[in-house]
Image: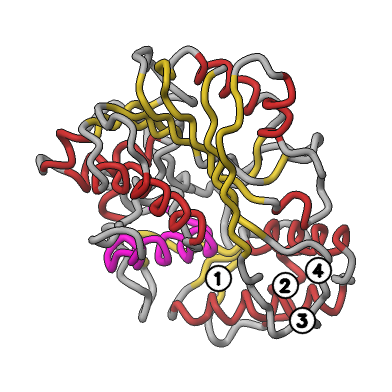
Amino acid sequence: MNSEMQINKPTPIFPGKELIQFDSNTDIRETLYAMKVGKKVLITEFYSNGMLLLKELQKHLKIRLPNKTLKEQHAFRAEYHKLSNLILLKIKNQEVDVDKAPKIGWLGKLYPDTNDFLLTFPQVQGLNSAWQKYKNGIKVPVLRNKVHPYYGTYFPTRFDHLTLFDNWLKRYEGPKKSAIDVGVGSGVLSFQMVQNGFQKVFATDINPNAIVGLKEFMGSTKLSRKIALYHGNLFATIEKEVELIVFNPPWLPAVSNEENIDEAIYYDKNLFPKFFAEANNRLAEGGKLVLLFSNSAEIKKITKENPIEKELAKGIRFKLEKCFKKTIKPVVDKTKPTKKVSIPEEVQLWVLAKI
């Protein structure tokens, strides 16, 4: 799409200091001690040596740090993140330069002109996981074809909210000339709308990887003529009025003192007020505003406030037409004791209209 668009990717490391070499004969305790004082470790010989060191790091931290309360778990994850990212791998000729390492296509696609650099072991693991999903595709029940999420792009891991939207689209009897998909991610909602007869979808995302990835995926197919892509926050540069606006926002409010939040998961206090203000100027008379949401924040006891209900309570811009809800089964971690939840988890589809 746009060769000038800056892709989000792990930053290559070019160390100026000598690194500790770690192979199958290296003393693990000495290596962990060196990491505790900030020394960086280069994995050599086999990829599995890095896996071993990560495993031993986890065991070491579980002994040293309590990991029961939410605060303790946060501290544990922070320490693990800090120390695990001291473990490095060399990248040479767009491949991981140790034996029996996975072949990761992203190294060639994201670093075509960069050679002989380092990445952290967790970064390489993330690239490998993302490559498998991109290469093999992900089956989404509401779509005819798999999606192939580009590196660093949001994709659904649960599908209940997509089923709600699919059922609503099948019953939708309004005009299907144009729609806006705010935060397109890997394209699922846009593909659903095209699949259900919408002539044109204007899709936005603040993440350049989503725009580049979808442009590559659609190529010159019929989809590329049905879906127009815009890079930017919320509505980007789209000023036109449409019959339908769809938004699958983050479902959890950010804690006030958090920095560098994952914007696919957490929303800041300005997101919804800004969204509703901008949506009001782009929704045609008689059009529908659809939001996919959940009660996750209430389940996790973060807040009982629902930002959609808060907007509706103002009675200025939008009124509620319908809210569809679907109770979903919680994901059970068999390694932990089951806790009784007083409020069932549910996904929600809110249909709003202009006042």
Q: Is residue 129 left or right of residue 30?
A: left
* Within-10-Å neighbours for mark 1: few <14, some 14–19, many 20+: some
Q: Amino acid at mark 1?
A: Gln
Q: Amino acid at mark 4?
A: Val
Q: CA distance from mark 2 to mark 3?
A: 28 Å
- Using the image, determine if residue 278 lies above or below residue 72: above
Q: Is residue 36 left or right of residue 353?
A: right
The x, y position of residue 248, in whole percent, is 51, 42
Please name which of the two marks, 1 or 3, marks the residue nearer to the observer: 3
Q: CA distance from mark 3 to mark 4?
A: 14 Å
Give the mark nearer the N terminus: 2 vs 4: 2
Q: CA distance from mark 2 to mark 1?
A: 12 Å
Instruction: Choose top left, top right, bottom left or bottom right for residue 27.
Output: bottom right
Q: Amino acid at mark 2?
A: Leu
> Residue 5, labelled with which disc?
none
- Using the image, determine if residue 165 lies above or below residue 319: below
> Residue 341, labelled with which disc?
4
Q: CA distance from mark 4 to mark 1?
A: 48 Å
Please name which of the two marks, 2 or 4, marks the residue nearer to the observer: 4
> Residue 21, labelled with which disc?
1
Q: CA distance from mark 1 to mark 3?
A: 37 Å
Residue 130 falls within the magenta-colored stretch: yes
Which stretch is magenta?
117-140
Give the mark nearer the N terminus: 2 vs 3: 2
Q: Look at the numbered disc 4 and give the secondary structure of its residue.
A: loop
Q: Look at the numbered disc 3 and give the secondary structure of its residue.
A: loop
Residue 48 falls within the magenta-colored stretch: no
> Residue 336, labelled with which disc?
3
Front position in the image: 315 or 140: 315
> Residue 32, labelled with which disc?
2
Residue drawn at the location 67% of the way across and 77% of the way down: 332
Please name which of the two marks, 2 or 3, marks the residue nearer to the observer: 3
